[in-house]
Amino acid sequence: MAEKYEIVITAEDIANAMTFMPLASKEVLTRSMALFCVEPVEVSGADGEPLPTMFRENRKLRHQIQMGILATMLNRNYELQSVKYRGDDGVREERLSWCMDADEYEKWASSHVMNQLERLKKCKNTETVNKVFDLLYDYKAIEMMLSGAIRDELEARNDVLNRAMQYLSNAAIQSAMDSMVDGEIRKALEDRKERKDG
């Protein structure tokens, strides 16, 4: 008995599919999506003092983006995921292009769309077979570029020297603020004493 899938990839989907994205477009897409695939992790030292934020990969969002890319290549409609991010005017929330909604992702993933594509490679229609190979090759190139862009983003944000400089800078600023406050309080007390004595 054949398994029933909620999402079924057909030869017609393959005929209408985008099987190639120019390299420059891949670069822009993967670099911009990588920004959303890293998330902050608050860390503290042994004494409980907060340390500069570290970042880790948001694998769930990466998978939703990858599935959104595949669905877009297949010219299929899907619900977009809402994401929060910090903009110039504070925290904003918007639907992210190329990122499939979590519930929609579950439908696509449980329908084993990648396996459906692999099975279409055995189709008797040579044109369909060739387009499936082309689509999967380009999709895998995008997938690898996204992984590389995420790795680059994590390395840049978690760079030990940058984090150490951030920590020292925060400590220096705090120390300067403490000194300035102490100095101003001391000066105010001295001024008050002079006025009293005078």
Image (cartoon, rainbow, N blue to C red):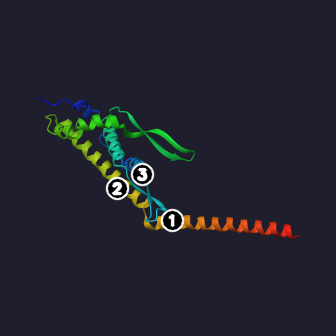
Residue at numbered disc 1: 167
Instruction: In the rendered view, tell whether residue 28 sits above or below residue 104.
Output: below
The residue located at (16%, 34%) in the rendering is 125
Look at the numbered discs 1 and 2 and tell me whether their residues touch, using CB distance below 8 Å.
Answer: no
- Between discs 2 and 3, the one toward the N terminus: 3
In-front residue for pair 189/66? 189
Q: Disc 3 to disc 1, how far (Cα)?
A: 19 Å
Instruction: Give the secondary structure at mark 3.
Output: strand
Q: Which residue is mark 2?
A: 148
Q: Residue at x 25, y 30 (%)?
A: 6
The residue located at (36%, 47%) in the rendering is 22
Q: Considering the image in quadrants, where does the C terminus appear?
A: bottom right
Residue 17 visible in the shown view: no
Q: Nearer the viewer, residue 10 or 127?
A: 10
Q: Amino acid at mark 2?
A: Gly
Snapshot quadrant of residue 169? bottom right
Q: Earlier in the sequence, mark 3 or mark 1?
A: 3
Residue 48 is left or right of residue 72, and the answer is right
Residue 194 appears in which quarter of the rendering? bottom right
In the figure, residue 99 lies in which quadrant? top left
Q: Residue furthest left?
A: 1
Q: Position of residue 64 (x, y in %)?
A: 34, 42
Q: Is residue 130 above or below residue 165?
A: above
Numbered circle sitting on residue 39: 3
Q: Amino acid at mark 1?
A: Tyr
The disc at residue 77 is: none
